[in-house]
Amino acid sequence: MASFDFAPGINPASWLNNTRIWDTELSNANTGMTASDGQSAFLLAIESLDAGLRVLLLGHDWEKWVYTRAYWAIREMTESTPRPYPLLNSEASRLRRHVAELETELKRMAHEDSSVDLTAMRLVLDTSALVRAKCFTEIDWPEYFERKPVRLIIPILVVHELDNLKNTGKSNKARPRLKKIRSILEGHGHGPGDVRSGVTLELLLDPPDHHRLPINDQEIIRRTDNLKGRVGGPLRLVTGDYTMQFTAEADDVPVFFLPDELRLDPDGPSDSVSVLNSPQTVGL
């Protein structure tokens, strides 16, 4: 499966038409009357795919599955190239499978977007917001933000960090917070599940074959930034870490910094999560 790290701000539903166009253009490489026709159709399809993926996806990982040795062999084809059709058909079919995977993920995202409440406040909780603050179930989020309903969103990487804190004994809050999350989402998959009146909880899962950034804070910020471009109400990244706050705001991601009244011990030592920002712990 290809890696699909979508760029912030994309509209999944509108991009579905592009995937259908790409599929048709690639299929034309299999129906050319001559090898030259197939070659021309294939190269035109690649140009269209290249132009779209540069906007749709982050980074350049997609180039690895577009510009293969087979692509360059097709590009160098001449009238004297023996048996060109098997290579053309194989490469076009391979790329159509990648486009189909891309379409499946966009459909999933579009389905999610079609069912969200566009007025709901979206709060993405980082690890510090879960271990340094009062339990998220005890906070009256609608009253605090003067907005109802509220969607609490926890990136799956934060769950991994909580697991690591629990297993290493670095926070006595990690285990009870994980139990709360599990009890709310039990029977609801990744959510949403009801927390209290006007408040729901959901997990933000990684895209298929997602490649995380080496620094956990940056990865959480990137996932929040991606959400910022999706349909929904106002969005804030909730954190108790100054480094997270400064980095997120530098990336134009809005932040709600935990005030003293929501902290467990605003004047005393805090549970540390900084150890989890090292590359060695990514993906645990």
Image: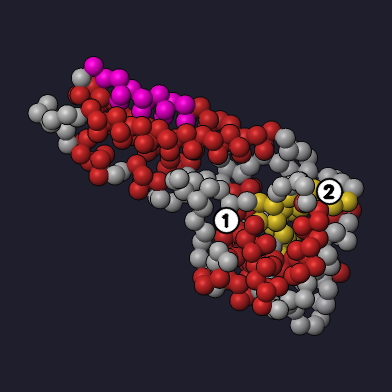
Magenta residues (range)? 19-33
Residue 37 horizontal/vertical position (percent): 23, 22
Place residue 181 in its image quadrant: bottom right
Residue 5 horizontal/vertical position (percent): 51, 48
Mark nearer the viewer, 1 or 2 = 2
Q: Earlier in the sequence, mark 1 or mark 2?
A: 2
Figure quadrant of the C terminus: bottom right
Tell me: 121 left or right of 279: right
**Picture residue at 43% right of the left edge, 38% below the top:** 98
Q: Main secondary structure of the magenta part?
A: helix
In the image, is residue 23 above or below residue 10? above
Neighbour tally class for label 1: few under 14, some 14-19, many 20 plus, Cα within 10 Å = some
Residue 229 horizontal/vertical position (percent): 61, 44
**Residue position for label 1:** 222
Q: Nearer the viewer, residue 74 or 44?
A: 74
Residue 208 horizontal/vertical position (percent): 53, 47
Q: Nearer the viewer, residue 129 or 186?
A: 186
Tell me: 48 left or right of 123: left
**Picture residue at 19% right of the left edge, 24% below the top:** 36
Farthest residue in the top direction? 33
**Residue position for label 2:** 194
In the image, is residue 56 above or below residue 182? above
Give the structural element (helix, strand or loop) at label 1.
Answer: helix
Is residue 31 in the magenta section?
A: yes
Farthest residue in the left direction? 80
What amino acid type is highlighted by mark number 1? Answer: Arg
What amino acid type is highlighted by mark number 2? Answer: Asp
Residue 131's mark? Answer: none
Tell me: 147 left or right of 239: right
**Picture residue at 90% right of the left edge, 48% below the top:** 197
For the residues labelled 1 and 2, say whether their Cβ atoms are less than 8 Å apart: no
